[in-house]
Image: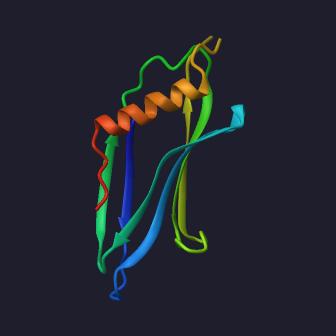
Amino acid sequence: MIITIKLKNPSVAPPMDVGFVWYLWLPGLSYWDPVMASPLLLPEGYDETFIIPLPIGNWGETSFSACWVVALLEPSTLDVIDMDYAFWLYQTTGGLSTSPEAFAEQVEKAIEENSLNFP
């Protein structure tokens, strides 16, 4: 799986302080896991794309739906400045052998190994 996250500050105003949050949501399991949360300073005209390859291994014998949720938040109020999401499906045949927690750990490890570094 290739995960692409684009951060942009098209304004010509002063740099923008924001909070960045990224969640993994498994709706069928009522499971949320914060993949990453970080304060960011987005300079004027900032435009960066981060590409994270996530190897797909054996995440169990049961298909499941999942969603990446990312948002930029106003740091003092936590109001959403911008948000996006991507639903996806892990498709296989057969019983769940990987817990949501173990799956989230695999995701976090893959992201760390692929060096997602924000400014």
Furthest residue toward front: 76
Residue toward you, 47 or 33? 33
Quarter the C terminus occupies: bottom left
* Number of callouts: 0
Residue at image location 36% in from the left, 89% down from the top: 13
Furthest residue toward bottom: 13
Percent coordinates x, y for residue 33 in the rendering? 58, 41
Percent coordinates x, y for residue 95 in the rendering? 65, 11
Furthest residue toward top: 94
Residue at image location 30% in from the left, 76% down from the top: 43
Classify residue 114 by image quadrant.
Answer: top left
Compared with 56, 61 (above or below) is: above
Residue at image location 34% in from the left, 86% down from the top: 14
Residue at image location 33% in from the left, 38% down from the top: 112
Compared with 56, 70 (above or below) is: below
Percent coordinates x, y for residue 83 in the rendering? 54, 63
Classify residue 65 by image quadrant.
Answer: top right
Q: How is the image coloured?
A: rainbow
Compared with 72, 59 (above or below) is: above
In the displayed structure, does residue 15 sit left or right of residue 103? left
Percent coordinates x, y for residue 31 in the rendering? 66, 36
Residue toward you, 56 or 79? 79
In the displayed structure, does residue 103 sit left or right of residue 77? left
Quarter the N terminus occupies: top left
In the displayed structure, does residue 4 sit left or right of residue 94? left
Compared with 15, 83 (above or below) is: above
